[in-house]
Image (tube, grey):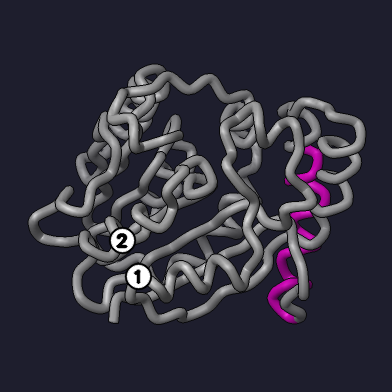
Amino acid sequence: MNTSTGKMPEYFGKDLEAMSFAVNYHKWILAEFYPYLGNRVAEVGAGTGTFSRLLLETQIGHLSAFEPSLNMYPLLEEALCEDQRGVAINSFFAGNSDAEGFDSILYLNVLEHIEDDLSEIANAHAALKQNGHLLIFVPALPWLYSELDRQVGHFRRYVKRELVKITRKQGFKIIKARYFDIAGILPWYVNFVLLRNSIDSGSVSLYDRVVVPLARPLERVLPPPIGKNVLLVAQKA
């Protein structure tokens, strides 16, 4: 996703379809972000609304779900139609998106799609209320960059220190930043870097049912020194 074009794209992502089966994985991420959501939440790049629905299961008061893709947006709108707290917005996110300001802004596997990620973080800073929270979840480790990453439009995979650096540069205070899902490194490397496979719902579902329930409590006790993803929470100072 290159927001510099200003065009409304179409996004055909088997990764989104497959990840819709990762219920435990998404609940794990939500648990990490939950204390920082606040009342008014923006989800940038909400896709088909898989995570949006989980957000609306919490006690938030309002969700603005931004999705610029022409083909994803109708599915997002349908996913949110039964809850008046959720509003689907067929647009790129901008720093002046809400006059009241947001309590939190969430980027779940989205920032890597944006070529100018520094400007995007600046947009988030402008749109947050004072002391509001920026919630980021991105793919990690450049050496895991695969043909799948390229096909779905990833400009990069992150390392923790660089994500912390660019977030601080835009005026945020880091609350927590950690690697996430160490168990996923080897399967990703073998399947997508070495074998150049495509992602499929069956393997995602198996990993979600078997590995995630074991990995989640372990990583709570022993935060991993490395992981397939980086999770970051920052506060507008």
Q: Residues within 10 Å of mark 1 (few under 14, many from 20)?
A: some
Q: What residue appears at the point 57 percent right and 54 percent down from the top-left corner?
A: 138
Question: What residue is shown with label 2?
Answer: 122
Q: What residue appears at the point 26 percent right and 29 percent down from the top-left corner?
A: 90
Q: Is residue 232 left or right of residue 66?
A: right
Q: Which of the 4 quarters of the picture holds residue 2?
A: top left
- The quarter of the rendered structure image containing the N terminus is top left
Check if residue 216 falls in the magenta segment. Answer: yes
Check if residue 77 falls in the magenta segment. Answer: no
The x, y position of residue 115, in whole percent, is 47, 43
Regarding mark 1 in the picture, which secondary structure is present there?
Answer: loop
The x, y position of residue 29, in whole percent, is 56, 59
Question: What residue is shown with label 1?
Answer: 170
Count of numbered badges drawn on the protein: 2
Regarding mark 2 in the picture, which secondary structure is present there?
Answer: helix
Q: Main secondary structure of the magenta part?
A: helix
Q: Amino acid at mark 2?
A: Ala
Q: Does the image show residue 59?
A: no
Q: CA distance from mark 2 to mark 1?
A: 6 Å
Q: Is residue 159 left or right of residue 135?
A: right
Front in this rendered view, residue 57 or 220: 220
Nearer-N-terminus badge (2/1): 2
Front in this rendered view, residue 233 or 54: 233
Determine whether label 2 and label 1 are within 8 Å by CB: yes
Q: Which of the 4 quarters of the picture holds residue 37?
A: bottom left
The magenta region covers: 205-221
- The quarter of the rendered structure image containing the C terminus is bottom left
Front in this rendered view, residue 213 or 41: 41
In the displayed structure, 169 sits above or below 89; it is: below
